[in-house]
Amino acid sequence: MYHIADEENKMKMITAIIEERDGDHTIKALNKEGFYCTKLAATGGFLKKSNLTILIGCEDEAVNSAIEIIKREAGRRSEERLYISGQGNMKGVSPTVPTVVGGCTLFVTDIIQFVKA
């Protein structure tokens, strides 16, 4: 398949960088809505955490739908996490605190040419 972008057939490439633990369910949700994805493993950032880079090629009018799916599945959210104090001899159950987890970085670029061989 060979495709050159023009005014009628605009295509975009979405590059989504997400936490590794959000990868499988994000890709499953994208596939369910008809998006095809390529998953690349990546490590980076301040804490050298394991991330995934997902590449999604789609028609121009489908970009917002894909972005909403990614934000819903891999966006920032609050989870209850155990609070760990610096005191080692505390007894009983540790309290939990709301902690922000997840998050995604998205880039949307124009596709000039698309070839599927």
Image: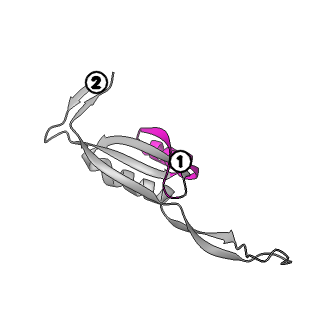
Tell me, for residue 56, which label it has, or none: none
The type of residue carrying mark 1 is: Gly
Q: Is residue 101 left or right of residue 104?
A: right
Asked if residue 99 is positioned above or below residue 9 in the image, the reply reads below
Asked if residue 113 is positioned above or below residue 74 in the image, the reply reads above
* Residue toward you, 102 or 2: 102
* Residue toward you, 101 or 86: 86
Q: Residue at x 32, y 42 (%)?
A: 58
* Coloration of the structure image: one colour
Q: Which residue is drawn at 50% across and 46% down?
A: 52
The type of residue carrying mark 2 is: Met
Q: Residue 12 placed where, x, y %?
A: 28, 44
Tell me, for residue 23, which label it has, or none: 1
Q: Residue at x 20, y 37 (%)?
A: 112
How far apart are the two marked residues, 1 and 2, measured between alpha carbons?
A: 28 Å
Tell me, for residue 1, which label it has, or none: 2
| Residue range of the region highlighted in magenta in the rendering | 19-46
Residue 13: within the magenta? Answer: no
Q: Residues within 10 Å of mark 1 (few under 14, many from 20)?
A: many
Q: In this view, does 83 lie to the left or right of 49?
A: right
Question: Is label 1 or label 2 in front?
Answer: 1
Q: How crowded is mark 2: few (under 14 residues within 10 Å), some or many (20 or more)?
A: few
* Residue toward you, 89 or 35: 89
The local secondary structure at tag 2 comes to loop
Q: Residue 111 placed where, x, y %?
A: 24, 39
Q: How many marks?
A: 2
Quadrant (top left, top right, bottom left, bottom right) of the C terminus: top left
Q: Residue 80 placed where, x, y %?
A: 65, 70
Q: Residue 7 placed where, x, y %?
A: 13, 42
Q: Which tag, 1 or 2, sits closer to the chain's start? A: 2
